[in-house]
Amino acid sequence: MFKPLSLFIGLRYTRAKRRNRFISFISFMSTAGLALGVMVLITVLSVMNGFNTEIEKQVFSLASQITVTNVQGELASWPQLRQSILTRPGVVGAAPIVTGTGMLVANGRVQGIQVTGIQPSLESQVSSLASKMIEGVDTGKKTIQSLKAGQFGIIIGKQIAASLGVGLGDRVTLVTPTHSVSPIGIMPDFKRFTVVGIFHASNGFGFDSMYAFIDLRDAQALYRFGDHVSGLQLKLKQVFQAPNISSEITTWLNQTQPLIPYVATNWTQQYGPMFNAIEMQKNIMFLVLLLIIMVAAFNLVCTLVMVVNEKRSDIAILKTLGASRGLVLRVFIIQGMIIASIGIVVGVMLGVLLAEHVNAVVTWIQSVFGIEIVSPSVYLTDRVPSLLSSFDVVHVTIAAFLVCLTATLYPAFNASKTQPAEALRYE
C-alpha cells in the first residue's frame, strides 16, 4: 500500500474532477490569488531594494563615510595620521580635505556653496567624483586631474553652473568668510577661479547645487590653514559598519594621541534617518502586501470547506475502515498545501521574472500610454531600479506557506470531526 496513506488520498482528491464546478473555480482563484500575491510582494521588495541601493550609490559617491578631525577643526601632520588610520580594520581608503563655505559670483549672480579642497591623486580612494564628471578642460578628459595647485581651478556642480550661467573656462569669483583689514575697514577675502570641470551627482541631495571642489593647497592658502587640513575622509569596506568603526577610531586616537581630542563622525549622523525610513517603509509594504496572500488564503479556506462537505461520505467510509482523526486531518492539510504550493511556486517564478525586467515593463508602459511613472525630480532616478534578493524570496515563500498552512487547519479539523453515522444516514 502507498505510504503514507494521507499523502496518497490527498493527491487523489487534488487530481480528482469536481462534481461541483463552483468548487473548481474557487480552487483556481485561490491558486491565482496566491500566485499574484507572491509575485507582487517579491517585485515590490526588489524595487525597494533597488531604490535603496540607488540612493546609497548617489549619497556615497560624494558624501564622506567617516570624517576624522579634532576639536580644533585642524589636523597637523596628517600624512602620518593617514598612514596610521589605513592600518585600522575595515578602512580601505583615506584622503585629506579642507572644507569651508563661500559664495560664487559670476554674471551678476550669487550662489552659496560648500567648498572642499581635495588632493586629486588621493580623492579616488574615498569618493566617485571622477566618475561623476560630465565636462572637463584637461585635454577634453572628464577627470579631476584638472585641479592643479597654484592655478586656482574649480570644479562645480551642474546646477551651480546653470544658476550662474557659466561653463568650462569661465571665470568666477569665490568670496570666503575669512577677512582682511583695509583702510576702509574689514573686507572679506575673494579669489578668481577658472571653471575646469562640471560634475553631476544626483538630483535629490544638493550635491550639484551646493558643492564645489578646488585643489587642496589652494584651499589651504585661501582658508589660511597653512600645512594643516580640516580632516581626513575615510572609505570603508562595509559602509554600514561606520558607527562602530568611527567609535573605535575615536577611542584609539584619543588613547594614542591624547593631547588634542579627536572626533570621528560618520554618515549615519546626517543620512541615517533617511535609510531607516526606507527600511521601515519596506517592512510596512511587506505587511500590507501580505494581506493579498491572506485574501487568497481565505479563498483556500472556502475551497477546503466545500471539499469537506462534498467528501463527507468518503470521510465516513474511511473512518468506518479504521482511519483515525489524525489521518483525516492530514489528508485535507495536504490537499490544501498542494493547492497552495502550486500558487506559491508559480508566484515565485513570475515574481523573479518581473523583478528582473520591471524597468523594461515600466518603460514600455510609459512609451505606450505616454505617461511618466518615474520622475527624476521625485524618485532621484529616471528608471525603476530593481535588486532581487534571495533572502527576500525565501522570506516571502516561508511567510506564504505559513499563512496557507494556518488557513488549512480549520477545514481539516472540521473534516476530522465527521461522524460516520451522521454522514452516511442518507446515503
Image: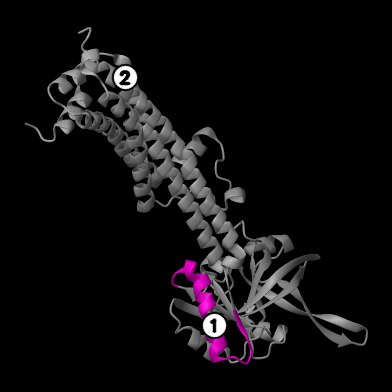
Q: Which residue is mark 2?
A: 306
- Judged left or right of residue 305, residue 111 is right
Image location of residue 379, percent across then percent down:
57, 50
The N terminus, quarter of image: top left
* Residue located 16% across and 18% down the image: 317
Badge 2 vs badge 1, beta-carbon distance below 8 Å: no
How far apart marks 2 and 1 lie (CA) works out to 68 Å
Q: Which residue is nearer to you in this view: 409 or 277? A: 409
- Which quadrant of the view contains residue 225? bottom right
Instruction: Work out whether residue 55 can be spotted.
Output: yes
| Earlier sequence position, callout 2 versus callout 1 | 1
* Amino acid type at image mark 2: Met
Q: Which residue is nearer to you in this view: 72 or 283? A: 283
User: Residue pushed farthest right?
Assistant: 184
Overall secondary structure of the magenta stretch? helix
Q: Quick one: SS at disc 2?
A: helix
Image location of residue 356, percent across then percent down:
38, 47
Answer whether residue 241 is magenta in the image. Answer: yes
User: Residue pushed farthest left?
Assistant: 1
* Residue located 51% across and 45% down the image: 284
Dot 1: within a 10 Å radius of its alpha carbon, few (fewer than 14), some, or many (20 or more) residues? some
- Which quadrant of the view contains residue 335? top left
Instruction: Work out whether residue 234 can be spotted.
Output: no
Region rendered in magenta: 237-263
Q: Is residue 52 above or below residue 345?
A: below
Q: Which residue is mark 1?
A: 251
Q: Which residue is nearer to you in this view: 183 or 236? A: 236
Q: Which mark is residue 323?
A: none
Image location of residue 166, percent across then percent down:
70, 65
* Residue located 67% across and 85% down the image: 220
Image location of residue 424, percent across then percent down:
20, 12
Q: Is residue 57 above or below residue 352?
A: below
